[in-house]
């Protein structure tokens, strides 16, 4: 039997900023690093075996002392034979070394395992780059940054609460030593511009009751009799009898998401207030009971310490205050102008490249024209040789006509004229002589024409 519990918005508004000692204790005593989840599909590997074999394997194969904070089995099961083992690390060196999947052993206690997902880069391996202009070429910025520091895995432009980009960039690394080196230098140069860097401080963990989905107390402290479904927001006395509608409805803000989702605006406000209180805390509190009785909403319990992991997960620093500094504004203007000059230089470079390509094509075309002219000159010389040879042949033929054929013709005409007479000396055919004379005149004229043309 399920019943819907109405939520009073006024009560939610009063509850969203109430910082309890339990929420402070939860934020300060969680494991500093996200767990590695080892998924097994067979066997019955215990957390003790996982811990011992991993320590032994990395000491023998990688000469690394693996610092493991805790190792336990998960309560959730997908199938009967499936189970997960959660591995929590103490320091950033151990955590970063395990980010490379090839460094893991192929099996543990004779059983194969897989990774359903890898943990995200924690704040202990992250940095913040300040005052990065919004008008820069972000892809070029990332490329230059990764080429200088190959240990950088992700570069993320930060946003404000209105989801607008700001002048801060988050850098996630896989090497604690490089991060420590950069923090000591306090500056970073990208594309010939120097930026200030600082450590990245993540928001505090929010304590959400797994029974009633309330904020700021543990399940053992919950006074609610029935349990609350994190999906639909309904209460039930027995999980087996609960028929969830699968329609997501948050009990805090009544929006369509799960009640323990960190994107809930009320949980976001609680998380921001808790983080501010942790950053601004200066005076230690004697005990959680005293703080609770005092009724102070800004409660911070400094009796909880990190112990051996304190060096890898340092205490929170005071809140950073950003003011409108005229010098910083001038620097921003200067950086924006430098970016504009860089864009103009890039345009000039592209135009110069196109001009150089044009000149190269023109030079190649000129070479081809010169080659064709040289080829024509060679052909002209050969034509001149052929003309000279023809002139020699014409002169030879002319000499042959004038010195040989014409005298023979004259002799033949004279002989024919003598043969055309009878015994009395009279011509036998009067037209023969006239025809011969006409032929002779025509041949003479043809010879004269040849001489004029030559």
Image: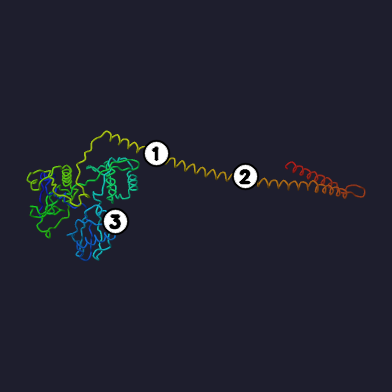
Q: Secondary structure at mark 1?
A: helix
Mark 3–mark 1 distance (CA, rounded to whole Å): 41 Å
Q: Residue furthest right?
A: 424
Which of the 4 image quadrants contains residue 1? bottom left
Q: Which mark is residue 216?
A: none
Q: Where is residue 14 drawn, in percent x and y?
A: 11, 44
| Residue 234 placement, left or right of 202 | left
Residue for badge 1: 345
Which of the 4 image quadrants contains residue 117? bottom left
Residue for badge 2: 377
Mark 1: few/some/many CA within 10 Å (<14, 14-19, 20+):
few
Q: Which mark is residue 100?
A: 3
Mark 3: few/some/many CA within 10 Å (<14, 14-19, 20+):
few
**Is 76 rendered above or below residue 440?**
below
- Nearest to N terminus: mark 2 or mark 3: 3
> Disc 2 or disc 1, which is closer to the eye?
1
Q: Residue at x 19, y 45 (%)?
A: 316
> Disc 3 or disc 1, which is closer to the eye?
3
Q: Secondary structure at mark 2?
A: helix
Task: Decide which of 189, 159 is in the foreground and name it.
Answer: 189
């Amino acid at each position: 039997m399920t019943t819907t519990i109405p939520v009073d918005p006024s009560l939610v508004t009063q509850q969203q900023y109430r910082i309890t000692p339990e929420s402070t204790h939860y934020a300060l005593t969680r494991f500093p690093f996200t767990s590695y989840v080892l998924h097994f599909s067979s066997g019955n590997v215990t957390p003790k075996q996982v811990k011992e074999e991993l320590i032994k394997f990395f000491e023998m194969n990688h000469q690394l002392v693996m610092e493991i904070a805790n190792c336990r089995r998960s309560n959730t099961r997908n199938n009967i034979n499936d189970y997960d083992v959660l591995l929590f690390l103490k320091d950033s060196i151990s955590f970063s070394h395990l980010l490379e999947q090839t460094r893991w052993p192929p099996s543990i206690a004779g059983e194969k395992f897989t990774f359903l997902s890898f943990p995200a880069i924690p704040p202990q391996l992250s940095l913040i780059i300040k005052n990065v202009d919004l008008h820069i070429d972000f892809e070029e910025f990332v490329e230059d940054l990764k080429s200088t520091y190959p240990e950088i895995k992700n570069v993320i432009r930060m946003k404000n609460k209105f989801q607008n980009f700001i002048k801060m960039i988050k850098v996630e690394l896989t090497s604690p030593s490089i991060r420590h080196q950069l923090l000591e230098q306090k500056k970073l140069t990208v594309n010939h511009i120097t930026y200030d860097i600082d450590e990245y401080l993540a928001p505090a963990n929010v304590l959400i009751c797994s029974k009633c989905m309330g904020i700021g107390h543990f399940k053992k402290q919950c006074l609610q009799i029935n349990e609350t479904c994190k999906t639909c927001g309904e209460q039930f006395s027995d999980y087996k009898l609960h028929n969830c509608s699968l329609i997501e409805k948050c009990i805090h803000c009544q929006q369509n998401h799960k009640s323990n989702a960190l994107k809930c605006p009320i949980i976001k406000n609680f998380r921001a207030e808790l983080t501010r209180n942790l950053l601004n805390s200066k005076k230690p509190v004697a005990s959680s009971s005293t703080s609770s009785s005092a009724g102070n909403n800004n409660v911070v319990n400094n009796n909880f310490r990190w112990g051996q992991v304190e060096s890898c997960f340092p205490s929170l620093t005071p809140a950073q205050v950003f003011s409108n500094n005229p010098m910083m504004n001038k620097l921003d203007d200067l950086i924006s102008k430098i970016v504009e000059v860089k864009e103009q230089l890039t345009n000039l470079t592209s135009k110069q490249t196109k001009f150089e390509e044009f000149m190269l094509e023109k030079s190649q075309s000129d070479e081809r024209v010169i080659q064709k002219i040289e080829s024509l000159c060679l052909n002209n010389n050969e034509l001149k040789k052929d003309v000279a040879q023809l002139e020699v042949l014409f002169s030879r033929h002319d000499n042959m006509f004038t010195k040989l054929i014409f005298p023979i013709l004259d002799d033949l005409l004279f002989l024919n004229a003598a043969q055309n007479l009878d015994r009395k000396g009279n011509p036998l055919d009067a037209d023969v002589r006239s025809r011969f004379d006409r032929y002779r005149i025509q041949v003479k004229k043809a010879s004269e024409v040849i001489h004029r043309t030559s």
